[in-house]
Image (spheres, rainbow, N blue to C red):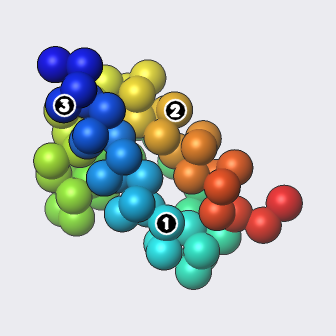
Amino acid sequence: MQHSSLRVRAVLLEFLKFRVLAAQQTFFRDETPEHRRAWLARVHPQALVLSDQQLDEVWNQAQLLYADH
């Protein structure tokens, strides 16, 4: 399970890369866990196996790596 979770997180982070680069901080505005899961259900459903905490960690990492500061 650990290996699978790490792979899903890595794939999701790569998936988010260009979306964050294009939208910058607007990507992270007005977001709730429910909105995030609804969006993922439409565009990247394989990430829904992650917990809300894991998704938060991936979102935070994407913001640190790809958003202008």
Residue at image location 31% in from the left, 32% down from the top: 6
Check disc 3 and report the residue beneath it. Answer: 4
Look at the image and tell me in which quarter the N terminus lies.
top left
Q: Sequence-wise, which precedes: disc 1 or disc 3?
A: 3
**Direction from residue 12 to residue 45 in the image, left or right:** left
Crowd band around label 1 with a 10 angstrom C-alpha radius: few (<14), some (14–19), many (20+): some
Q: Secondary structure at mark 2?
A: helix
Q: Secondary structure at mark 1?
A: helix
Q: Sequence-wise, which precedes: disc 2 or disc 1?
A: 1
Q: Is residue 54 visible?
A: yes
Quarter residue 27 falls in? bottom right
Q: Amino acid at mark 2?
A: Glu
Look at the image and tell me in which quarter the C terminus lies.
bottom right
Check disc 1 and report the residue beneath it. Answer: 17
Rounded to the nearest angstrom, the CA distance separating label 2 from label 1 is 14 Å
Quarter residue 55 falls in? top left
Nearest the eye: 37 or 53: 53
Check disc 2 and report the residue beneath it. Answer: 57
**Direction from residue 8 to residue 52 in the image, left or right:** right
Judged from this view, the residue extending furthest toward the right is: 69
Q: Sequence-wise, which precedes: disc 2 or disc 3?
A: 3
Rounded to the nearest angstrom, the CA distance separating label 2 from label 3 is 16 Å
Question: Of circles 2 and 3, which is in front?
Answer: 3
What's the mark number on residue 56? none
Looking at the picture, how far across and down is residue 59, in whole percent?
52, 44
Looking at the picture, how far across and down is residue 14, in whole percent?
40, 60
Question: Of circles 1 and 3, which is in front?
Answer: 3
Judged from this view, the residue extending furthest toward the bottom is: 22
